[in-house]
Amino acid sequence: MDIMSYIKNLNTKDEIFSDVYQYGIENNVPIIDSDALTVVKHLLKISGARNYLEIGTAIGYSGLHLLSVFPDSKLITIEIDEEKHQTALSNFENHRVSERVTAIKGDAKTFEPDALYESLDFLFIDASKGNNQLFFDKYSKYIKKGGLIIVDNILLRGQIVEEELSSRNRRKLREKVNDFNQKLAESNHETSYLPVGDGLLVITKG
Ligand SMILES: C[S@@+](CC[C@H](N)C(=O)[O-])C[C@H]1O[C@@H](n2cnc3c(N)ncnc32)[C@H](O)[C@@H]1O
């Protein structure tokens, strides 16, 4: 057994949204890695954050988990794909959290936030990876000072350090994700880069 499998076994808990998880697996929906999810939920619990903004709802899997940390938390979540958005709405309904969720069908690159976006204390960026910088610049300003920001998939399944990438598109994506990772490292924000799941960047809003 390798170390990552050893950790995964220790982190494993009963899946509380197994219907959504199964649907995700069967339909090839990219959902957050289970180890990464464990860490995100743990950090949320420590931070005490209750008002969340997620970029990249997919089918609502991570959103359901985020909402399970505190019963009085609220989530605004944005998804560009109509079918996934509709599936997420059903999942939120089925798991009786609809009244705590504002699910927006739209492009987070151009979406215009409104008064809803006051006093947010957690931002989860998990959409098109080449736009991490844009999403960070656009939405981090709505997170209150001391709030938590987490960006998923900052390691691109190891491609972030792969010397030979045959696809031009992958090389371009790698460059964009790397530029973002480097820029945050050199910024005044407090950052931690965690090699869990596909890599999490944890930021405390300064
Ligand atoms: C990795 S999946 C999100 C997974 C989800 N957070 C989870 O763990 O359950 C990324 C999602 O972002 C969506 N997406 C990509 N670009 C987007 C954009 N510009 N605005 C909103 N959603 C976007 C994709 O359609 C996809 O469903």
Image: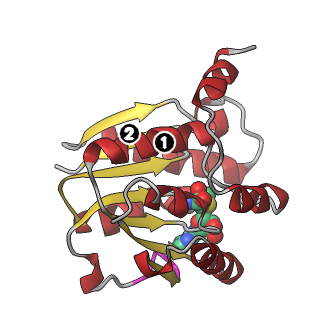
Q: Does 47 sit above or below residue 73? A: above
- Can residue 107 be found in the magenta stretch? yes
Mainly helix, strand or loop, the magenta region? loop
The residue singled out by tag 2 in the image is 182
Q: Position of residue 198 (x, y in %)?
A: 59, 39
Q: Does 108 sit above or below residue 52? A: below
Disc 2, ligand 1: is the CB inside 8 Å?
Answer: no
Which residue reaches farthest right? 26
- Can residue 170 be found in the magenta stretch? no
Q: State the separation of the CA atoms marked 2 and 1.
A: 6 Å
Instruction: Report the front residue among 141 and 133.
Output: 141
Q: Residues within 10 Å of mark 1 (few under 14, many from 20)?
A: some
Colour scheme of this structure image? secondary structure
Residue found at x 29% / y 86%:
114
The picture quadrant where one finds residue 46 is top left
Identify which amino acid the numbered label 1 is placed on: Asn
Report if residue 183 is visible in the image. no
Instruction: Report the front residue among 60 and 183.
Output: 60
Secondary structure under tag 1 reads helix
The picture quadrant where one finds residue 1 is top right
Identify which amino acid the numbered label 2 is placed on: Gln
Mark number for residue 178?
1
Span shown in magenta = 106-111
Residue found at x 73% / y 61%:
19
